[in-house]
Image (spheres, rainbow, N blue to C red):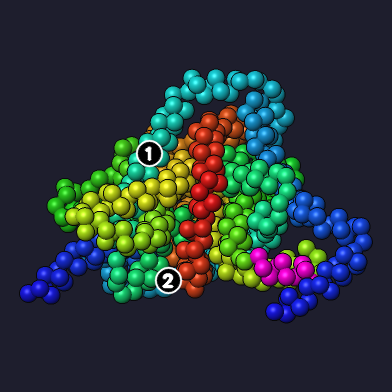
Amino acid sequence: MVTGHRRLERAVRLWLPVGFFLVLALFPFYWMAITSLKPNAELYNKNVMPLIVHAPTLKHYVDLLTKTSFLLWTWNTMLIAIVSTAISLILGTMLAYPLARMRFAGASLIAMTVAAVYLVPQPLLFIPLADVINRLGLGNTLTSVILTYPTMLVPFCAWLLLGYFKTVPKELEEAARIDGASRMQTVLQIFLPLCMPGFISAGIFAFTLSQNEFLYALIFLTKTTVRTVPVGVIAELIRGDVFYWGQLMAGALLGSIPVALIYSFFVEHYVAGLTGSIKG
Amino acid sequence: MTVVSHRLPGVRRAVNGRTPLKALLDREAVFSWLLMALPLLFLASLVGYPLVYGLLLSLQDRPVAQTGTFVGFQNFVVNFHDPVFWQVAVNTFVYTGVATFLKMVGGLCLAVAMNQHFRMKNLVRALLLLPFIVPTVLSTVAWMWMLDPAFSVVNRLLVALGWPKPGPSWLGDPTLAMISIIIINTWRGLPFYGITLLAGLQTVPPELYEAATIDGAGGWQRFRFVTLPLLRPIILIVTLFSVIFTFADFQLVYVLTHGGPQNATNLFATYAFDIAMGAGQLGLGASVALAMLPALAVLIVALTIYMRRS
């Protein structure tokens, strides 16, 4: 009697709300997946129960991979995300280390500026940036986004790493300095190897942010061969009023997998980054 | 111990073995500025310069691929007399206000529900964060299909539950279109709220709840008088974040409704995009984008100061 009551209470207090949020969060992905597996005859037939697949087919995936440049877009997206993340980690470290460890005039001003720049949203910058990219002759090159993504990722990485660096004990660096190491040697050989968890957090977060980016890619990349997955899917799988829903859902699912996969390996680091990203 | 035994000879070597240049590079200020020079230069040229350049553009009549002519505040006057501009302003505030409120309330519920012990909690947390991880454009396309005029699964479920056929026209009706973008924005942003608040909840010492319980506080009172006050700083920060990025949202609306129907979901960012990239009026577009600046500047300064303090 008592345990039965307990169980009911636990179901109401725990599984009811958690289940609700889970269904809400996951249903669109479920819908993506089953739509991508349905043949068109089933997809556009209102008399079939829609929540399951009756006659699964891989046709939409085959079409997506053979009739569109999806694989090329995936390659572009990965390349852009990896290079801009690497650049951002390096530049972010160059900003964060002095702010975390050194005392110099203007340090707090620089820290405030970095935080403020981190919060400047893209729509405030895209029109002048489009003109700058045009004048530099970088339109329709991967360089255009590899150069502009770090404008949001560098302040972000710097901010996150600044928080992380402050938690690393100073004693080892002090010992190295006493042993005669230069500041640069201390940073490269003693300090940075201690900060791997911080780099993984910032890196994963920056990587997902670059995969998510749309506005700059939409404006700077207008040729099929240089497009990223989000832009390619929107620009080339929706043709006028014609929606290729099977291919669109296959593309949306495949485009989400790299991010989801990397995320699943590093969930803890990601959550640390998430909570760290809003802490001072 | 080894450190201590090496200390004295180490100091001597450090002092003797250094040239003036090395000694200079060793000074904290010199080393710091040298290290920061490249990233600061980068940010100055690709954030600072475009910001200033955007201000100048907003004062010009500047068709794309032509030279601009200085027109003073004429673009802002044009916006002031443009009914669509005011509609866009109202849309942006409604969208930001309602979506942020829903994310805050939903996020709090999520955090409280998740702040219990159960098996596979980490897996559940990872799954709940998926909407926030997956590229917005791709998940929005899924929502677009879920709200499709002819084959909406949402409507088919509603009809099955007794709603008159064919069900609501989610993206065709102005009010419903606004509700749709708010729901999707909430769907995407709620996990961010929930998981950061959960992290905050987990730092609340259990003794406080025990003390409150001993003092006779019920579940709601414990939440109201223990949890909420302790969470207030983190709620404030997350909310400011959310407001900034919802206010300047672009991709969700661009993909789902493109600002329609009849500008019912047009936001500052999408309207500026249409004017600058669609109609090729860079100057006027820049002035629409800059209309976001006052509100954003206040929010950014407030959040920056708050983050520094905490």
Secondary element type, mark 2: helix
Give the crowd class for mark 2: few <14, some 14-19, many >=20 residues within 10 Å. Answer: some
Compared with residue B131, is residue B245 higher up or lower down, i.e. above or below? Answer: above
Q: Residue at x 37, y 71 (%)?
A: B123
* Magenta stretch, residue numbers: A170-179
Q: Which amino acid type is marked by label 1? A: Gly
Q: Quadrant of the N terminus of chain B?
A: bottom right
At which x and y percent is residue A83?
Answer: 66, 62
Q: Amino acid at mark 2?
A: Lys
**Looking at the image, which residue is at 71% across and 32% down?**
B66
On screen, residue B109 versus residue A218, left or right, reads: left
Q: Are marks 2 and 1 in contact (CB under 8 Å)?
A: no
In the picture, the disc for residue A56 is: none
- Above-or-below relation of A108 to B115: above
Chain of the residue under label 1:
B
Viewer-closest of A190 and A12: A190
Magenta span main SS: helix
- Per the image, the residue denoted by label 2 is A59
Q: Residues within 10 Å of mark 1 (few under 14, many from 20)?
A: some
Single out the residue that lies furthest toward the left.
A1
Q: Is residue A113 visible?
A: yes
Q: Nearer the viewer, residue A94 or A53?
A: A94
> Is residue B230 left or right of A207 when viewed as pictured?
left
Q: Position of residue A1 (x, y in %)?
A: 7, 74
- Residue A178: say if magenta: yes
Disc 1 target residue:
B97
Tell me: A77 left or right of B125: right
In which image quadrant can residue B285 be found? Answer: top right
Q: Position of residue B117 (x, y in %)?
A: 30, 70
